[in-house]
Amino acid sequence: MAAQPVVQKSGEIVIPDPPLAHTLFSTTRFAWLFAIVRVYLGYEWLMAGWHKVEDPRWTQTGEALQGFWVRAVAIPEQGRPADRLWLVPRLHPVYARCRLVHLVRQARRLW
């Protein structure tokens, strides 16, 4: 690979990729490797969630989901509670916590 100029004639600044990064990401030479990695990661992702479809604790009784909610709103004996706002996005923190506690108290276990 020939060295590329840092500044082209038009004045545009070009920063060349390192040779390894160029070979991996800018050519099709390693496409087969990335295809294998993508298929493997997709398989693992599906298998990680498939048990939730088959497990009656997730789909029928809701025990697993209630356990998740209970741990999400639990306040530790010492220290401050973990930030769980990702569970209820775009809401005020106080409202988010109250909503989660309400879901647990109402036994909203099923999807």
Image (cartoon, rainbow, N blue to C red):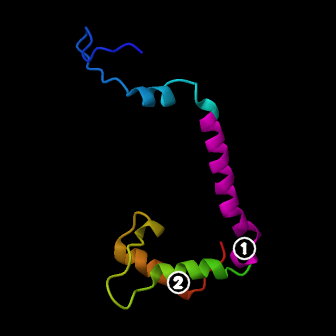
Task: Look at mark 1 in the image and give the residue it sits on.
Answer: 59
Tell me the residue at 42%/74% (across/down).
96
Q: Quadrant of residue 13?
A: top left
* Residue in front for this viewpoint, 22 or 51: 22
Say what secondary structure mark 1 lies in. helix
Q: Is residue 19 visible?
A: yes
Q: Amino acid at mark 1?
A: Thr
Are discs 2 and 1 less than 8 Å apart at CB? no
Is 39 included in the stretch rendered in magenta?
yes
Q: Amino acid at mark 2?
A: Val
* Residue in front for this viewpoint, 32 or 59: 32
Q: Residues within 10 Å of mark 1 (few under 14, many from 20)?
A: some
Residue 70: which disc?
2
Pick out the residue farthest to the bottom. Answer: 77
Tell me the residue at 41%/26% (across/down).
19
Is 34 included in the stretch rendered in magenta?
yes
Q: Position of residue 77 (x, y in %)?
A: 37, 91
